[in-house]
Amino acid sequence: MTASMDPAQIAALQIEDDRTGLSIETLRRALADNLFYIQGKYPEIATKNDFYMALAYTVRDRLLKRWISTTKAYVKKNVKIVCYLSAEFLLGPHLANNLINLGIYEQIRKAVEESGLNLEELIEQEEEPGLGNGGLGRLAACYMDSLSSLEIPAIGYGIRYEFGIFDQEIHNGWQAEITDKWLQWGNPWEIHRPELGYNVKLGGHTESYTDEHGNYRVRWIPDQIIKGIAYDTPILGYQVNTANILRLWKAEAPESFDFQAFNIGDYYGAVNKKVVSENISKVLYPNDEQVQGKQLRLEQQYFFVSCSLQNMIRIHQDHGNSLETFHENFAAQLNDTHPAIGVAELMRLLVDEHHIDWDKAWDITQKTFGYTNHTLLPEALEKWSIKLFGTILPRHLEIIYEINRRFLDQVRLKYPHDVAKIARLSLIDETGDRYVRMANLACAGSHAINGVAALHTELLKQTVLRDFYEFSPEKFSNKTNGVTPRRWIVLSNPGLTSLISSKIGDNWINHLEDLRQLERFVEDADFRQQWRQIKLETKRNLAKYIQKKTGVVVNPESLFDIQVKRIHEYKRQHLNVLHIITLYNRIKHNPDCEIVPRTFIFGGKAAPGYYMAKLIIKFINSVAEVVNADPDVRDRLKVVFLPDYNVTLGQRVYPAADLSEQISTAGLEASGTGNMKFSMNGALTIGTLDGANVEIREEVGEENFFLFGLRTEEVYALKARGYNPWDYYNSNPQLKEVIDLIASGIFSHGDTGLFRPLLDSLLYHDPFILLADYQSYIDCQERVSQAYRDQDNWTRMSIVNVARMGKFSSDRSIREYCQDIWNVEPVAIELEEYVQSKAGLKV
């Protein structure tokens, strides 16, 4: 301001607030202020983490005004809220994603660079929250992004695991699990809410009594009480003002220190309650092979569900609403069976705590819950032994017995003479040791049941949930999974994003079906060249990362053949390796044979107690060791296992793929979402007709999809006839040579026993029919190689894959849930500007 400025100019001059302003100068000032006042550092002594934290708080400030405006609007309008209950939320790093959704990526980049820092380095500094194991948790994260982007009122409820899924290191080819200390440097995105605490009971016994009105009542006298404390993270939508809540619960002891124990010298006893209580939210998915692990897992599930339902009831009553209208204000979605105990818990809260009549409480409960099933594997449908369940949750066992009694009375009316069907529908498995069936509880206690891909939903109706479908067909629908294009294209693949937007505008980011417009450019040679160049650049970047992390040098011009996902026998990573060995044998027979150069890239974690999955990781690395070192191969084949696969690594891998491996046994993958992320980034798919592969192939066209393998009905028929893997081994010389080479010890330094369990499983059992699908897979891979030789046509196929992926946005999935299951509407948020001069409190 100068003396020469007239009053009108002075009045027109606006000075941006440091917490909300978006000019480069204001952002730089905010960054410096947060380094000084939040981190307590000055630049000369600040660490890279200090600079990251200062930047994160700068961005969070700009989030918070949207969050506050969103919360105020929901309270004022008394809206219906979607409550997404999930044991996992695999969010990925927040910083870059929030920059995209706020629309300030470039402003922040300039502000950071003008401050003498590098934005990419600060983004890489962020520790990824390891709050999920795989697809289930990543789906929950995509759905939270879409709920906010579509302006749907929502709260995500889960557990704030102190230690997330393990960090994976590879030692001598084997997986080693390292503690995931994701919170060690602090988490700037969460807000601790100590005032939001709820008591959770465990163990003990129940007592019945008659209240003053003569009604039969039950009180639960627990052995232990845990306190759940809320930690909130804002989840911002893409270029809207909506910021919903992800509320994660941390377990604490009601009293952290026992002075009486301390005063008599029992120092361990003085803090024991704190230690025992906090174990519940200590680690994601304990190894549940032992009874202690099973108990902790059940306690975890009940803990977060109880906290969440108590919180929902509190919100409802704080708005002045009667609990009889609870289902009109909340739609609670059970993300698989982990939160299914919520059915019994809501009944307990309504009947025991709030004294609502059973029939009315059951009506409220059923209208509140929807259940998403994620598995066709019967062994993956959770069951808890009656003894364990009754010890931890005695009142819930009583409630489940009563739910079951009333439910089976309805079943008998429909099937009076079908004893077997009644037994299958029962919430209690009475065969052998008795168990509580959590999927049955979820089905009985929900008004809607859905699968996550068209094939999956049909197979649910025919197999694991057939009896429930026949009993209540009106409950069933399909909701094919989707993924958010904000993280999986815009953030992960900025080059492709820019090219697409230069041709069709950027409306596609919120309306992915607009990608169809790209088909107009398929025959544009210049466009194809630009497309190829962007893919090559992403491959070069991944090649640099591979060399840095593994020491393996790969050729970016080679076909990048990628399989990244959880390591499991049904996902058949070892079928992929059989193909590698097949190619290796061809080279050994004829070193000058013509082979399209390929780089095989694997990534994924095996469950700590899953020996065969760990052996598959060792198998991949052992084959890589031989193939990569053999001079006959001459770099035509390279095999890489990328350790510690997570969201961050996925953002590097998906854009760089030429070929996406989706090769699970038909009928076993519920949906898959990696298949969608690959296709959205221009990879072509080789796959079976399994999960969402079926719908991807329908969308992109069969000519743009590499299909192989038996179909689901053929798998069932083969097993019904009596599948004998030896028939395939003995009748296929190429397959026999591969199996015999593994057995010889060439990939195990002469140790013929190392991979014997893997070979015995294939030859004597082969539950996932690798040997039956082997030749079809090899033939299909040959078609892949032939197609890759014609780079121009491969690029056409790549463009078409991206153009036809509109269906697989999580926005479409969420719209279907809102319309068919939740009955919720968008709520537009008006942004309330924070004005410092009017910010004084007046309470």
Image (spheres, rainbow, N blue to C red):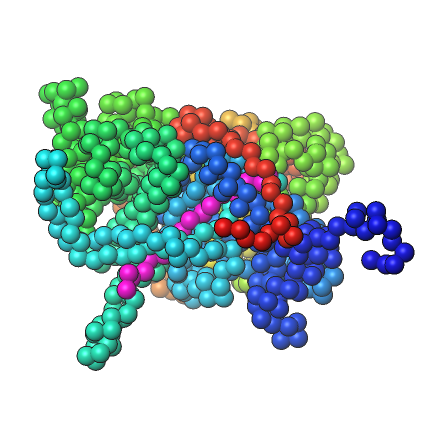
Q: Quadrant of residue 341?
A: top left
Identity of the residue drawn at 51% across and 26% down = 698
Q: Which residue is the extreme one toward the bottom? A: 265
- Residue range in magenta is 240-255
* Image quarter hosting the N terminus: bottom right
| Residue 342 visible to an observer of this rendering | yes
Name the spot of residue 710 as percent of width and height, x first: 39, 32
Q: Main secondary structure of the magenta part?
A: strand
In-front residue for pair 331/757? 331
Name the spot of residue 41 as percent of width and height, x first: 60, 72
Q: Quadrant of residue 770?
A: top left
Name the spot of residue 509 as percent of width and height, x first: 61, 36
Identity of the residue drawn at 65% across and 33% down = 507
Instruction: Answer with left or right where residue 735 lies relative to residue 461.
Output: right
| Residue 636 visible to an observer of this rendering | no
Identity of the residue drawn at 24% across and 39% down = 354
Is residue 251 on the magenta stretch? yes
Instruction: Answer with left or right where residue 467 lies relative to residue 768.
Output: left
Identity of the residue drawn at 29% across and 62% down = 253
Q: Which residue is the extreme one toward the front? A: 842
Name the spot of residue 240 as percent of width and height, x first: 59, 39
Q: Quadrant of residue 37?
A: bottom right
In-front residue for pair 171/146? 146
Give the answer, above or below, for where 179 lies relative to 828.
Answer: below
